[in-house]
Amino acid sequence: MNLSKLITGCKKGDRKCQKQLYESFGPKFLSVCRRYMKTSEDAEDALIQGFYKILSKIDQYSGEGNFEGWMRRIMVNECLMSLRKKNNFKLQVEITNIEIENPVTVEDDLAYEELLLVLEKLPTGYRTVFNLYVIEGYKHREIADILNISINTSKSQFLLAKRRLAEIIKKKHKAYVS
């Protein structure tokens, strides 16, 4: 079934279409949720909540723009809402003179599953800002607005995330060499 028929079926409340939509996009969006959430269980909860919102608000999708992008935005927002309930993103950290010796290109050094495992080791604030900036492509001003934090906090969380990722990757590399 093509995507437009699937969307039409979901708008009509057709359970088979809803199931097919979930089966088609569930794995992809679970990996999106896993990048934001600390545990697999929290990621699965966010996925379920996200799909509930997608199916209950599918009438709001006008047909313009990318449907997968529309759903992805709902998933990311669901993860962020869940994180906001559990975490305080207002932590202010002033940093000066941070130097990162070698910029880390995570995509080059790690497979996707390894990336998820490394991201799970980051504190929630670092992981959230890193995901929004690097993977979702938001600017620090947008991240600050989304998380209700200052732009400097967004930038510092990102720099600290990069530093922590570099440390984790170096430790992992040393373990392989030894």
Image (cartoon, grey):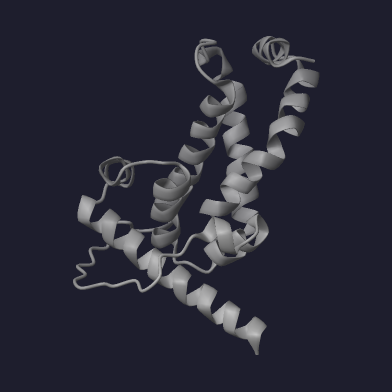
Vertical side of 103 occupied by 16: above or below: above
Which percent across, then down, holds residue 126?
Answer: 40, 61
- Location of the N terminus (image quadrant): top right
Q: Report x, y in % for residue 121.
A: 53, 69
Q: Is residue 164 left or right of residue 72?
A: left
Please tell me which residue lies in front, 22 or 1. 1
173 sits to left or right of 87: right
For the point 64% across and 63% down, which residue is it? 114
Q: Residue at x 57, y 59 (%)?
A: 108
Residue in view at x 31 percent, y 42 percent: 139
Between 103 and 60, the residue placed more toward the observer is 103
- Measured as percent of width and height from the top left, residue 151 is found at 22, 50
Which quadrant of the structure image shows residue 47? top right
3 shown above or below 124:
above
- Which residue: 49% across, 33% down? 73
**Residue 119 screen position, x and y as percent:** 53, 62
Image height of 44 relative to 164, above or below: above
Q: Quadrant of the C terminus?
A: bottom right
Location of residue 156 with respect to 45 vertically, above or below: below
Res. 149 visible in picture: yes
Residue 150 appears in the figure: no
